[in-house]
Image (tube, rainbow, N blue to C red):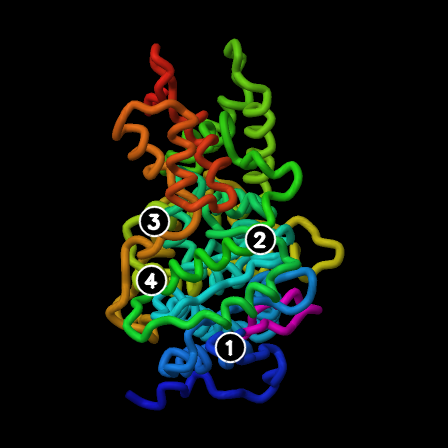
């Protein structure tokens, strides 16, 4: 292989201090350091992070990696798409080539994180969007705080949920991932934990103490990655400060969650919109007003998005459910390249991010019915001889996150397994699940929501799966 780090060498104009690295015993910290830009990710930062991660991977002294952001507002608010759109506007094909190169670098980093062989922990303390999602959601341990603001806003700027969104979002429960991808819905604080975006929740005031405590951990040389992650998992719970006030109920729950799974199950955007309109306009006795209001708000959100982005993103969600990690990043690289040639990207970024105050983008085509199936499929078509993305890690791909059942809150399938195994009362199911997770914050609330939404009760008061 040619110089392994040829793509990652410092370039003229790179800021020497946009990423800060530190060592604390076995912990290696990575701090994104562009607080005035909400730590937006750019090529200069990626060119620093990748070689460091490769270095830490080889070092026996480096046992745990922690990534966070500088300043009080953001972990990372996204990739620096404003710079990309400006470059395309000013330099045409040269700008498109530079943007394609940037996405290639970004996806290589994200895939490296997704397949990293050592514990990698992300502190989602603040705004976590776009490129910041790529730096965090593929980590086995993702810690939300009261400051977390998570979203994938790409359909609103004429793009698509990239950075491995093809893999991560379809693997959220039910149709939650599709809903987040199309609407750009925001999850704040502990809601990121309930949704499965984060695996843990603690107060931001104890993050520095947690880092110091993690630096004290000593792993046995023969301990595998899973064993090390479980030790870290238990250590994080030492800093459990409880749920914040008024956060004991998941935001996306009950009748609204049922409506999300129903409305967003369809394979065309038109069918999703039709289902939402039925929910909004329903006059059925007992139809919850909360659901009608939610449907109306969701329709308004979708009406603001790029029609092309909506259709491409929905297709991406359905295909991504079958892709492994390498497939996801390689296919996203081609999709991103196609968007660099589509007018909606420059229009969306210019209107939403560059223009002060933000204005309404001029989408082209302007309506869903003007975006054909052939237009959508063209984004997924790989031309003969087209150069693919060369990833940095080979042979470590997977179809599901390998530690998804070990870390984070129980999934619905875990609750179903307990309910179907033997006859139990509701409180018994809750206590068993809480015991399995050793009292982890949020478990009780998540399990109670699942039971209320998915289960009934028989004549003897035992929980029955299915309503």
For image coordinates 38% across by 50% down, the residue present is 316
- Quadrant hosting residue 447: top left
Q: What residue range appears in magenta? A: 30-42
How busy is the neighbourhood of tag 4: few (under 14 within 10 Å), some, or many (20 plus)? few
For image coordinates 59% across by 43% down, the residue present is 243
Compute the Cα span from label 2 to label 3. Answer: 20 Å
- Quadrant hosting residue 328: bottom left
Q: Are marks 2 and 4 in contact (CB under 8 Å)?
A: no
Q: Position of residue 227 (x, y in %)?
A: 33, 62
How busy is the neighbourhood of tag 3: few (under 14 within 10 Å), some, or many (20 plus)? few
Compute the Cα span from label 1 to label 3. Answer: 45 Å
For image coordinates 43% across by 35% down, the residue present is 264
Dot 2 or dot 4: first in sequence order is 2
Residue beneath label 4, please? 227
**453 lies above or below 287:** below
Residue beneath label 1, please? 94
Residue beneath label 2, please? 202
């Amino acid at each position: 292989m040619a110089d392994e780090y040829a793509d990652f060498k410092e370039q003229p104009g790179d800021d020497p201090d946009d990423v800060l690295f530190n060592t604390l015993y076995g912990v290696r910290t990575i701090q994104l350091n562009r607080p005035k830009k909400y730590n937006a990710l750019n090529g200069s930062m990626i060119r620093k992070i990748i070689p460091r991660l490769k270095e830490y991977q080889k070092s026996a002294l480096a046992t745990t990696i922690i990534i966070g952001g500088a300043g009080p507002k953001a972990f990372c608010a996204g990739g620096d798409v404003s710079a990309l759109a400006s470059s395309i506007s000013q330099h045409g094909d040269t700008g498109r080539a530079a943007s394609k190169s940037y996405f290639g670098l970004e996806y290589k980093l994200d895939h490296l994180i997704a397949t990293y062989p050592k514990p990698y922990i992300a502190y989602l303390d603040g705004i976590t969007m776009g490129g910041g999602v790529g730096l965090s959601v593929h980590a086995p341990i993702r810690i939300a705080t009261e400051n977390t603001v998570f979203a994938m806003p790409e359909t609103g700027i004429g793009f698509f949920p990239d950075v491995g969104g093809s893999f991560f979002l379809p693997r959220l429960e039910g149709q939650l991932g599709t809903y987040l991808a199309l609407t750009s819905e925001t999850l704040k604080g502990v809601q990121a934990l309930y949704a499965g975006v984060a695996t843990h929740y603690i107060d931001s005031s104890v993050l520095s103490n947690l880092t110091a405590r993690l630096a004290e951990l000593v792993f046995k040389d023969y301990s595998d990655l899973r064993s090390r992650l479980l030790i870290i998992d238990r250590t994080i719970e030492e800093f459990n400060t409880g749920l914040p006030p008024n956060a004991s109920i998941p935001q996306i729950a009950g009748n609204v969650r049922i409506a999300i799974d129903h409305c967003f199950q369809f394979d065309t955007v038109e069918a999703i919109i039709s289902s939402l309109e039925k929910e909004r306009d329903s006059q059925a006795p007992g139809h919850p007003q909360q659901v009608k209001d939610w449907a109306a708000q969701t329709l308004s959100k979708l009406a603001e998005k790029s029609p092309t982005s909506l259709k491409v993103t929905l297709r991406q969600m359905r295909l991504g459910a079958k892709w492994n990690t390498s497939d996801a990043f390689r296919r996203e690289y081609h999709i991103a390249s196609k968007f660099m040639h589509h007018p909606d990207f420059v229009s969306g970024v210019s209107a939403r991010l560059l223009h002060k105050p933000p204005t309404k983008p001029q989408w082209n085509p302007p309506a869903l019915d003007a975006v054909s199936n052939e237009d959508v499929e063209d984004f997924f078509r790989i031309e003969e001889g087209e150069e693919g993305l060369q990833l940095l890690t080979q042979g470590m791909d997977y179809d599901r996150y390998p530690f998804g059942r070990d870390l984070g809150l129980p999934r619905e399938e875990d609750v179903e397994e307990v309910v179907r195994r033997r006859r139990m009362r509701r409180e018994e199911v809750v206590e068993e699940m809480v015991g399995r997770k050793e009292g982890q914050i949020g478990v009780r609330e998540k399990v109670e929501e699942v039971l209320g939404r998915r289960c009934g009760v028989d004549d003897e008061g035992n929980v029955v799966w299915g309503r």
